[in-house]
Amino acid sequence: MKNNWEIVIGLEIHVQLNTVSKIFSGSSTGFGAKPNSQASIIDLGYPGVLPVLNQSVIEKAIKFGLATNAKISRKTIFSRKNYFYPDLPKGYQISQLELPIVQEGYVEININEDIKKIRITRAHLEEDAGKSIHEGSLGKSKIDLNRAGTPLLEIVSEPDMRSAAEASSYMKYVHLLVTYLGICDGNLQEGSLRCDANVSVKPRESKKLGTRTEIKNLNSFRFIEKAIEIEAQRQIEILESGGTIIQETRLFDEEKQETRPMRSKEEANDYRYFPDPDLLPVVISEDLIESIQQSMPELPNQKKMRFINEYQLDKNDAARIAHDFDLATFFESSINHSKHASPKQLANWLLGKLSNMVNEKNINFSKLELDPFDVSSIVDLYILGNLSQKQAGELLEYKHGSEASIEDLIAEHKMSQISDTHELSNLVDKILIENKVQFDEYKSGNDKVIGYLIGKVLQASKGQANPKVVKEIIERK
Ligand code: ADP
Ligand code: MG
């Protein structure tokens, strides 16, 4: 992209709250049930039925507000947002306009080496709509209302992001936060977190924001980045050829790699919002907020700081571990089990070999078929010099999903590291003869050559020789 343009992005993220029942009815929120088996007369908006607020959505929203340094409204109200759509049988969505439950918060995200503050304008509660299904129905559309009435927390950011990468980092951080808080299952494939991206561009030096478009319903980090880049590029091309941007809602087409118009932008007053007469204002007590405050878990950035202070990890390693809840849990549990490895050494193994294993298997740390106890035992054997680094890595692979004990696997694969000085001494002699030139160089004072010689011995031993012992022998000779 041309450097004189700056992209401006604000996100509206819809987080599905992980309640057992819906926001205003007792229907189940479970995913994947037979179509329309989880829609009650309240979700369908039958005349005369009354919604009843599910208290746990209030608690979950407050948790989010406290975690984002926000103001929690002491009085919050629900409003009707009126529009017609086949998957909204009531003809309105219950949402919040005035007095949303959470206002004026912020989060801090890591951008390269810097920390950037992204302000949150508001987070409000609302019900989800049903789903229209157009595929495979021979020219007809089907409607599944199981999702109607599922609780959502809509988190609206200020237009504080300046690149597609920043937007996806922010979305990742919100995803991390709601999973840490335990208020959302975080399952992107099932649509538990969806985002609308508002995108505009402006000349870099200009203070005034450009006209924005809103790209609807992005449900993966990769799509968010791609859609924003493509949309910004489209806007720049229009502006550079003298055109103007129309404020509208657009859809991202992944196959065609383009965004295209969906509808012209509606304003709040198009929806004829008004307070829902069936729902009383909710008064939030200091006691409730206080008790939720007491039960707050440690947050990702707090965990990161603790890892730095308590375990002397460097900033990047601490962030990488703390920003993956399952990995962080695994890490602390392996520290507890380990007898010889330092937290720093364990962190290296978890971020190196084990992260590779997790990525190759396309799983996360909680699904690893190795427990922290196995990992710390194997790393301990490496630290003690009983296994080479290569062998320890292989042993982790063998142990994955295996019932066999570590001792049995070591025996089966004839793995123990050769630390026997006599045996190694013979091998070293052989290598020094074969590499006479380098050995002479070493003897004449070029210390660096020793690495080469050690490498040759390790190679000849198929990685089984203990490098420390080999080094000592060469030095002696
Ligand atoms: P609406 O309710 O009509 O969608 P809001 O005022 O609530 O409008 O804003 C929605 C989102 O658009 C917010 O996340 C906000 O940060 C973002 N936004 C507002 N103006 C711009 C702009 N010029 N460029 C990019 N994003 C913007
Ligand atoms: Mg919007």
Image (cartoon, grey):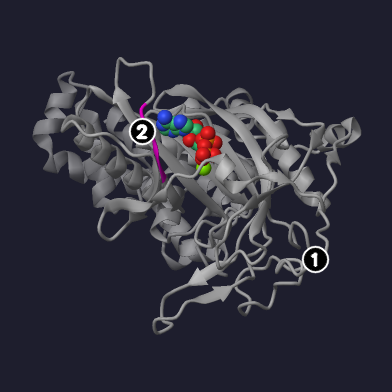
Amino acid at pointer 2: Ser
- Dominant SS of magenta comes to loop
**Residue under label 1:** 26
Q: Residue visible at 67% across and 63% down?
A: 90
Estimate how packed mark 1 is, as few (under 14), some (14 to 19) or many (20 or more) residues with alpha carbons within 10 Å: some
Which label sits in the foreground, 2 or 1?
Answer: 2
Compared to residue 400, the image places residue 453 above or below, namely above
Left or right of 25 in this view: 388? left
Outermost left residue: 437
| Quarter of the image where one finds residue 26 | bottom right
**Residue under label 2:** 200
Q: Residue visible at 66% across and 39% down?
A: 97
Q: Position of residue 145 (x, y in %)?
A: 62, 71
* Residue 45 visible: yes
Foreground residue, 88 or 136? 88
| Quarter of the image where one finds residue 455 | top left
